Image: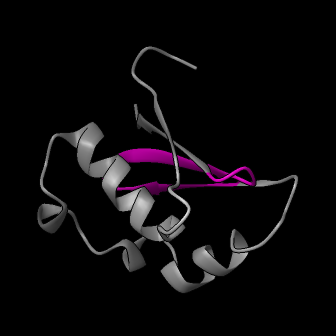
Amino acid sequence: MSASTSQSAVEPDDSVSMAVVRAVSSAADRPVLELPPLYGAIDPDALDALFDGHRTAGRIEFRYAGFRVTVRADRTVSVSPVE
């Protein structure tokens, strides 16, 4: 993981999609409401459904608001700037 990559765990009561928005907001140092809608990058409901359960393997990567976002089966979110 590079120095410009941040990683966080999704809280048990939080949705993966909301955790992604919060992680990007923090990395971009911008309020959540100033970010573009997540659905412009990925379907938030599908993202939540994909990681809602007991998966033990897998990940998805996508770009959102100038960042590369990786969500892993263990419900960790990594965010790094797109170069």
Residue at point 40%, 31% (across, down): 83
Instruction: Give how far across and how far down residue 77 sits, in percent.
Output: 54, 47
Q: Nearer the viewer, residue 74 or 45?
A: 74
For residue 74: magenta?
yes
**Image position of 43 (left or right of 52):** left
**Image position of 25 (left or right of 55):** left
Q: Which colour scheme is used?
A: one colour
Residue at point 25%, 50% (across, down): 25
For residue 73: magenta?
yes
The dominant secondary structure in magenta is strand
Instruction: Give how far across and how far down residue 55 sits, in percent.
Output: 84, 63
Instruction: Give how far across and how far down residue 56 sits, in percent.
Output: 88, 54
Q: Nearer the viewer, residue 51 or 35?
A: 51
Residue at point 47%, 67% (across, down): 14
Specify the quadrant that holds the N terminus.
top right
What segment is highlighted magenta in the picture?
60-75
